[in-house]
Amino acid sequence: MEQTPTAARARALTKVYGAGAAQVRALDAVDVDVERGRYTAVMGPSGSGKSTLMHCLAGLDSVTSGDVWLGEVELSRLADRELTRLRRDAVGFVFQSFNLLPTLTALENITLPIDIAGRRPDPAWLDVVIDTVGLRDRLRHRPSELSGGQQQRVACARALASRPQIVFADEPTGNLDSRSSAEVLGFLRRSVAEFGQTIVMVTHDPVAAAYADRVLFLADGQVVGELREPTPERVRERLAATDPASV
Amino acid sequence: MLRTSLRSLAQHRLRLALTVVAVVAGVGFVTGTYLFTDSLQRAFDRLFDLRQPDVTVSRQLPGQAATGGAAGGAERTLPAALVDRIAKVPGVAAAYGVVTDGSATVMTAGGEPLARLGQRTTGTSWVPNPRLRGYDLVSGRAPIGRGEVALLASTAARAGVTVGGTVRVDTPGGVIEPTVVGLVERPIAGTDGGTLVVFDLPTARRLLLEGRAQVTSVVVAAAPGIDQQRLADRITDVLPPDARAETGRSRSADLAARLQDAFTFLSTFLLAFAGIALLVAGFLIYNTFTMLVAARTRELALLRAVGASRGQVRRAVLVEAAAVGTVAAGLGLVAGIGVSGLLRRLFEAFGVDLPGGPLVVEPRTIAVALVVGVVTTVASAYLPARRAALVPPVAAMREELELPARSLRGRTLLALLLVVAAVVLARTGLQLVDDVERAAAYLGGSAVCALVALLAGAPLVGRGALRVLGAPLTRWPVGRLARENARRNPRRTAATAAALAIGLAVMSAVAVIAASTKSSVAEVVDDTVGADFIVASANLRPFTPRAYEALAGTPGTSVVTFSRAVALTLDGTQHPVIGVEPEQFAKVFKITMAQGSFADLAFGGAVVDETTAREAHLQLGQTAHVEFLNGPGRLRIDGIYQASGAAQGFVVTLPTLAAAGSLERDTAIYVRLAPGADAATVRTALEQRLAPVGAFQVLDRTELKEQIDAQFDRVFGFVYALLALAVIVAFLGIVNTLALSVHERRREIGLLRAVGTSRHQLRVMVVLESVLVAVLGGVVGILLGVLYGALLQRVLAAQGVSTLSVPVAQLGWFVAVSAAGGLLAALWPAMTAARMNLLRAIATE
Ligand SMILES: Nc1ncnc2c1ncn2[C@@H]1O[C@H](COP(=O)(O)OP(=O)(O)OP(=O)(O)O)[C@@H](O)[C@H]1O
Ligand SMILES: [Mg+2]
C-alpha cells in the first residue's frame, strides 16, 4: 500500500450528544492528523472529548458532522458491515479495562480478531508479538489467572496480532501500578520503534504521555495544543497552562 | 430496605419481565388445568342435572349397579305392557315407554359415520311430554311414521341437512333414508360429541328392537304434590323383580357421582402434566433468580458496604421475589384462562367435543395460583438470596465479580445416593411381575429419583458433555465461543437443559411404549389372526347378522364366520364373553390351549384365558356361577387357553350365548380365501354384498394393524400434545437464560464487536449456544426416557406389550425439534445481542 503521511485524519469533526437543553458538544470542529508510524498521545481534562475523538476515529461511533478518514477510507460512507470489517482488519483496540473474554485463554484472546475474521494467524509474527509482550509461559492461562498488567499486555498483543494499520488505546494503564504501566507502555513504544506501528493513546498520566512521539491536548471538545518530543515535565507544564486544575 | 427492593424491581425492566414470564408460565399451566376441569365439570353437571323425569323405570338386576346415563339399551328391555300398568299407579300423571339404543348411526352424504370412534350414536323414541325428554324441539315438528326423524341440531349441521332434507341412518333394522322434520337441542350449549336421532315410538321399536313389543325404559311424570320417592315406591310394587324405579333425584346424584369419578381421573391426569410443567417452571424461576442475583452482586455488595446486614440483604431479595410472585400469580391466573381454552381446543382436536359453559373460577384455583406463584418464586429466590447475603462488601469495589461458588461435593453425594435409590427401586419394580400397578409405581419413583439425580449431577458432568456435544461447533470461529459460553456456568446450563430434559424424558418414554405397543399388536395379529379379511362396521359398533348373511358363501371364500361379544360379571368383576362357531373360528383365529381342547367346547361350556382363570380361581371342569346381562347363569370350564393380546375372557358357543339372552349382534366377521382365489376380487365382492346392509370396512391383516395403530396414535398424540406444553415452558426457560446471559455479557459483546465481530457472527454465537444447550437437554432427556420406556415395557410385557421397540427415527425427530426449539428460543436474545450499542456495552459499569 502506498504510504500516506497520515494514518487517520479528521476534518471539522463534530460530535454532539443528546438534544435540547441536555445537549453536549463533545467534539467541536476538530481537525486532527495522526501520523503514520508514530506514537500519538491524547491528553486533556476529564470530559474534554478524548474518548469520543478516539471512538470517532476508530469507527466505533458515528460523527455528527465533519469527515474522518482511516487511511484512505472515508468512514462516514461506510455501512455497519464495512465498518465491522474495517475494525477487524485495520484497527486494534486496547481499553482501560475488560479487554479479554473470560472464557478464552490468553493465546485465544490474542488471536481472537484473526479467528473471527476466519484467517490463520501468521505464526512468525505471532511469535514476535508474544515474545515482545513476554507472556510465552502464560499463554494457556485464562484472564482470571493473570494480573492486571499481564491482562493489559495480552490486550496489547491482541491489538497488534492482526497487524492493524492503527492501534487505539484508551487509558491502557489507567488501572495499573507504575511498574505494570511501564511494562505496557514500553511494549507499545517498542512496537512503534521496531515494527513501525501507528498508535493513538489516551492518557491522564504525563509519564505515560512521555512515551509518545507527540502529544495532542484537548479541552472542551477542541484541540488546544500539541507537543513534540514530550518529557513528563514539559507535559506537566503544558497541562498546567491549559487546565491548571488537572495537575 | 423495602424501598430499595421495590425500586430495584422497577429499574430493571428486563429482569422483571423475564421473572414474570417464568412465573406466569408455571402458574398459568396449573391454574389452566383447574379452570378447565372445573368448568367442564360444571357444564356436565348442568347437562345431566337439568331435567330428569320424576321416576324412570328400567331393567336392572338386583345385584347390578345403577345404570346412570341413558336408561336401558336394546340389551335390557322391559315388556311394553308394563307402561300401561305403571300409568295406572295412583299419583302418576303420565307414563311413556321409551326405546333408546346406541346403534343408530347417522351417516354423512359420503356414507361415512358422522360420529367419530367412541362417540355416541344414539337413537331414541319421541316422548310427547316435554318434561320427560332430555331435549327440546327447536324447529319443525315431532317425527311421525317410518319416513321421518328429528335430529339433534348439531348432528344435522354436521350432516349438512336442514328441516325438509333427507339423511341416511344405519340401524340394526336396516339402512333408512328418512326426511328430517324437526331439530332438537339439549337444554345446554355444546354437545357430548355424539349424534342423536329421534324416531316415533313404533319406528324406534322396529329399527332398534327388531319390532319386539318392548321398551328400554319408562319415564314417569308425577301428579302435582306427589313426592318422587313415594311415587317410585308405589311403582316398584307393580314391577317385576328385574325392573327398578329410580327417582329423578337419585339418578342425578348417581350421575354426579359417576362424573365426579371420571373428573377426578381427568384432573389428576391433567394435573400430572401440570406438575411436570410446574417442575419445569420452577427451574425457570430458580434459574432466573440465580442469574438476577449474580447480575446484582455489585449492587448488593454496595448495600452491605454501606451497612446493610446479611438479613437485610436476604430480605431485600425475598421481598422482591414475593412482590414479583404475587403480581405474576395474578397474571398467571389470567394466562390460565388462555391455557384452559387451549386444553379445550386440544380435546376438540382429538375428537372429544365438550359441552360449553361459563368459566368456573373456584376460590381454590385462586388460592393455588397464589400459593404456586408466590411459594415457588420465594422458594426459588431463597437459595440465591442466601448466597447474595454472603457477598462480601469488598466485592463492590472489585472489578470482576463472582458469587462465592458452592462446593459440588454435596451435589455429588446427593446424585450418587439418588442413583442408588433409582436402581434399587427399578429392580424392586421389575421383580413385581404380577402386580403391574405397583411395579409401575416403583418405576415411577425410580424415574423421579433418576431425574433429580440428573439435576443434582448435571453440573458435574455437564461440562464434559458440552465439550463433546459442542465439538462440531469449534469449526466456526464463534462456535468455540458459543461452546465456552455454555460451559462457563455449568449450574445454569444444567438447570436450563434439565427443564427440557424432563419434558423430553417423559415424551421419549411415551414414544417407546407407543412403539412397543404397536409392534406387539402387530406381532399378535400376525401370530393369531388367520383370517384374510376382517369385516367390522365402519364405527366399530356391533351389527346385526344381516351382514353375515350377506357375506356367507361369497365366491372365492373358504371360511366365513363371526364373533359376538357381551359381558358377564363374576365375583363383581366384568369379563368379556365371546360367542363363536368353534370349528369355523379355529380356522381363522389361533387359540393355543394350555389345558383342555378347543374342540371340546360345547353348549353350556366356556374356555377361558389363563390370566382370568388364575384371578378368578377357575379350574378345568369346574362350573362358574356368573351374572349375564339378563340374569344369573352357569358356565362349565371346558378349557384354558394361553393369554395373548388378541383374545381375552370367556369364549363360548353361539347357543350358549343365545341361552344367556344375548341379542344377535356381531362384532366382527372373519373371512378366509379359498385356495387360489384373488384377494382383490374377493374384497370387491365382499364390499358389494355389504353395501346395502350398511357402512362396513373390510380390512386385511395389514390394514387391521394400521387401524389399531391409528387408534393408539390418537391416544398417544393427545399425551404428546399435553407434554408439548411443558416442553414449550422449557424453551421459554432457554429464552430467559439466554436473554439474561446476553444482558450479563454485554461488555464482552461490546468487546467482540470492537475487535471486528459482525452482527451476524454475534447472532450465530448466541444461536449456537442455545442450540447446544437444547440438544444437551434433548439428548439427556431422550436417553433417560428410552431407559425408563424400556423398563416400563418389561413391566407391561404381561399386559400384552411383549416386544420392545425403540422408535429411533422418532427420537431423532425429538433431537431435531430440540435443536430447532433452541434456535427459535435464541432468536430474540440473539437479536438483542446483535443490536446492542457497542459503545454503551463497553462503557457500562
Ligand atoms: N453516550 C453519551 N451520551 C451523552 N453524553 C456523552 C456520552 N458520551 C460522552 N458524553 C459526554 O461527552 C463529553 C466528552 O466525553 P468523553 O468520554 O469523550 O470524555 P473524556 O475526555 O474521555 O473524559 P475522561 O477523561 O473522563 O474519560 C463529556 O461531557 C461526556 O459527558
Ligand atoms: Mg475517556
Image: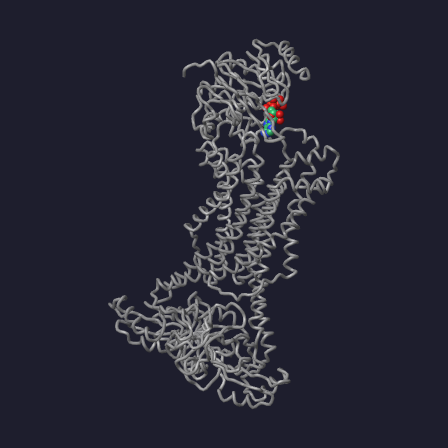
Residue B610 position (above or below residue B225): above
* Residue found at the very far left of the displayed protein: B676
Quadrant in the picture for the C terminus of chain B? top right
Residue B256 position (above or below residue B430): below
Residue B365 position (above or below residue A5): below
Residue B314 position (above or below residue A184): below
* Residue found at the very far front of the displayed protein: A20
Q: Is residue B226 left or right of residue B106?
A: right
- Nearer to the camera, B397 or B503: B397
Q: Is residue B282 left or right of residue B517?
A: right
- Nearer to the camera, B654 or B769: B769
Residue displayed at 61% across by 9% down: A231
> Which quarter is ligand 1 in?
top right
The picture places residue B701, in percent across and down from the top left corner, at: 35, 64
Q: Is residue A124 visible?
A: yes
The picture places residue B732, in percent across and down from the top left corner, at: 54, 46
Quadrant in the picture for the N terminus of chain B? top right
- Identify the image's colour scheme: rainbow, by chain, secondary structure or one colour: one colour
The picture places residue B410, in percent across and down from the top left corner, at: 63, 41
- Nearer to the camera, B452 or B55: B55
- Nearer to the camera, B217 or A170: A170
Q: Is residue B781 left or right of residue B301?
A: left
Q: How many marks?
A: 0
The picture places residue B393, in percent across and down from the top left corner, at: 71, 32
Q: Is residue B620 visible?
A: no
The answer to which image quadrant residue B564 occupies is bottom left
